[in-house]
């Protein structure tokens, strides 16, 4: 058996995101998770059976990387970006699109800088091993215009979305799935605006084509019309295959 402790200061949903995303994997491999948080920090202990140790550690590293390059990056941009001319919703979507634009490269960098020790502090990894990546984020902030017109906002969003390198994504009502029919939960790391959760999930899936299976939320339809246009495809009667 191998026991790994994951910690983070403050009150966040980051470690719960990890537990939710790996719940099936943990159940299948008999990996046990215990929440040992206190008032100062969030902490979970994971006990991993030896036959699955390398596999489970790789899965944990991937989820920790997602937390860093979506959750921590969102917080970084939220605190650093000062722009005018955008509504609150437009700014949220703009920040999410910026996160999505470099998601694959950022995730690879983060995975390579997470050492799977017996105790892993997310704050420690962020502050001491992600400095080079944070400098890149600072450069992005410096390049953003200080004022967005409606046209500049739409053109900027379209530019980022058109440059996405993902494949097809599938939307079933309020759920987003990748090309392998794995459900995406990354939107939960990008703020707490529930009204934009589906749009954020779509952006963070980085898909080039969007396939609608059944009727999605109305707000998502308007968002897809505006930014995905001819890359939206409609399907009926198969939603039960993806739920």
Image: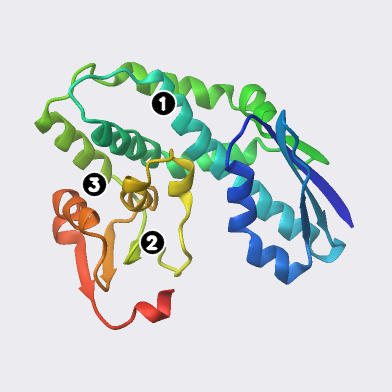
Give above or below for 128 relative to 116.
above
Residue 121 point in image, percent of width and height: 72, 33
Q: CA distance from mark 3 to mark 2?
A: 19 Å
Mark 1 or 3, nearer chain start:
1
In percent of the image, x 40 and y 26: which residue is there? 78
In percent of the image, x 57 and y 42: which residue is there? 13
Which of the 4 image quadrants contains residue 29? bottom right
Q: Which residue bears the numbered disc 3? A: 162
Q: Are marks 1 and 3 in contact (CB under 8 Å)?
A: no
> Tag on residue 236?
none
Which secondary structure lies at badge 3? helix
Q: Which residue bears the numbered disc 1? A: 77
Q: Nearer the viewer, residue 83 or 163?
A: 83
Residue 7 point in image, percent of width and height: 72, 36
Which of the 4 image quadrants contains residue 119? top right
Which secondary structure lies at badge 2? strand
Q: Which residue bears the numbered disc 2? A: 176
Which of the 4 image quadrants contains residue 178? bottom left
In percent of the image, x 52 and y 32: which residue is there? 72
């Amino acid at each position: 058996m191998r026991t790994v402790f994951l910690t983070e200061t403050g009150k966040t949903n980051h470690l719960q995101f990890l537990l939710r995303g790996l719940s099936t994997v943990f159940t299948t491999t008999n990996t046990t998770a215990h929440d040992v948080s206190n008032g100062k920090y969030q902490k979970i202990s994971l006990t991993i059976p030896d036959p699955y140790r390398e596999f489970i550690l790789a899965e944990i590293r991937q989820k920790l990387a997602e937390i860093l390059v979506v959750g921590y990056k969102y917080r970084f941009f939220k605190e650093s970006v000062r722009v005018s001319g955008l509504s609150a919703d437009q700014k949220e979507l703009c920040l999410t699109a910026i996160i999505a634009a470099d998601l694959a490269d950022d995730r690879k960098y983060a995975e390579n800088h997470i050492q799977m020790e017996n105790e892993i502090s997310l704050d420690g990894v962020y502050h001491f091993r992600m400095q080079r990546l944070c400098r890149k984020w600072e450069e992005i902030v410096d390049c953003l215009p200080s004022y967005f017109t409606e046209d500049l906002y739409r053109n900027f969003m379209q530019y980022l979305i058109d440059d996405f390198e993902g494949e097809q994504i599938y939307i079933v009502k309020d759920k987003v799935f990748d090309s392998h029919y794995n459900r995406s939960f990354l939107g939960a790391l990008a703020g707490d605006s529930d009204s934009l959760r589906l749009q954020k999930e779509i952006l963070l899936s980085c898909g080039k084509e969007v396939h609608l299976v059944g009727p999605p939320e109305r707000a998502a339809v308007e968002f897809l019309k505006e930014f995905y246009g001819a890359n939206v495809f409609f399907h009926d009667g198969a939603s039960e295959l993806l739920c």
